[in-house]
Image (cartoon, rainbow, N blue to C red):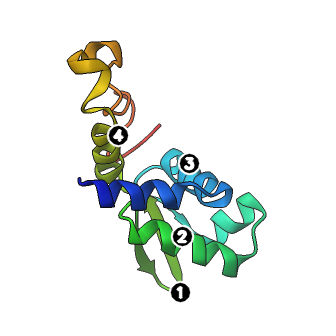
Amino acid sequence: MNDNDAVSALAALAHGDRLAAFRMLVRAGAGGMASGEIAEGLSIPPTRMSFHLATLERTGLLRSWRDGRRILYAASYDDMRQLLAFLTEDCCSGKPEICGDLATLPASCSAETCA
């Protein structure tokens, strides 16, 4: 990850609706959720939600796929890890143990499933 990619990802997350949608999708796991379900769960009009999801997808933080008439979205755990690793790679004057291992998800959460 480079500075421009990190700035784009952080800018996408720097909006309340997008941050809420991203966190909802992180909790949902690899199976993701339909855009309509996300909009309903966050009480956001579907057209506005589609705009926000597209913004997150352009940064690589989300991935999408079609299932019949629905478009499903899921968090891209690999890209999320890369962003966290980028943010913490120079942690604490070369003493990363102070920051802990922030770049990995808990053992109960993987790219395939997230509990």
- Name the quadrant containing residue 109: top left
Label 2 amino acid?
A: Leu
Rendering coords of residue 45 (x, y %): 75, 75
- Name the quadrant containing residue 84: top left
Identify the residue under disc 4: 84
* Other-residue count near label 2 (Cα within 10 Å), few / some / many at <14 / 14–19 / ≥20: many
Element under disc 3: helix
Label 4 amino acid?
A: Leu
Element under disc 1: loop
Badges 2 and 1: C-beta atoms under 8 Å apart?
no
Identify the residue under disc 2: 53
Q: Residue at x 52, y 50 (%)?
A: 28
Rendering coords of residue 90 (x, y %): 25, 30
Q: Mark 3, mark 4: which one is toward the viewer?
A: 4
Rendering coords of residue 96 (x, y %): 26, 19
Q: Mark 4, mark 2: which one is toward the viewer?
A: 4
Identify the residue under disc 1: 69
Identify the residue under disc 3: 23
Name the residue nearer the viewer: 44 or 109: 44
How far apart are labels 2 and 1 at the CA level?
A: 17 Å
Label 3 amino acid?
A: Arg
Q: Mark 2, mark 1: which one is toward the viewer?
A: 2
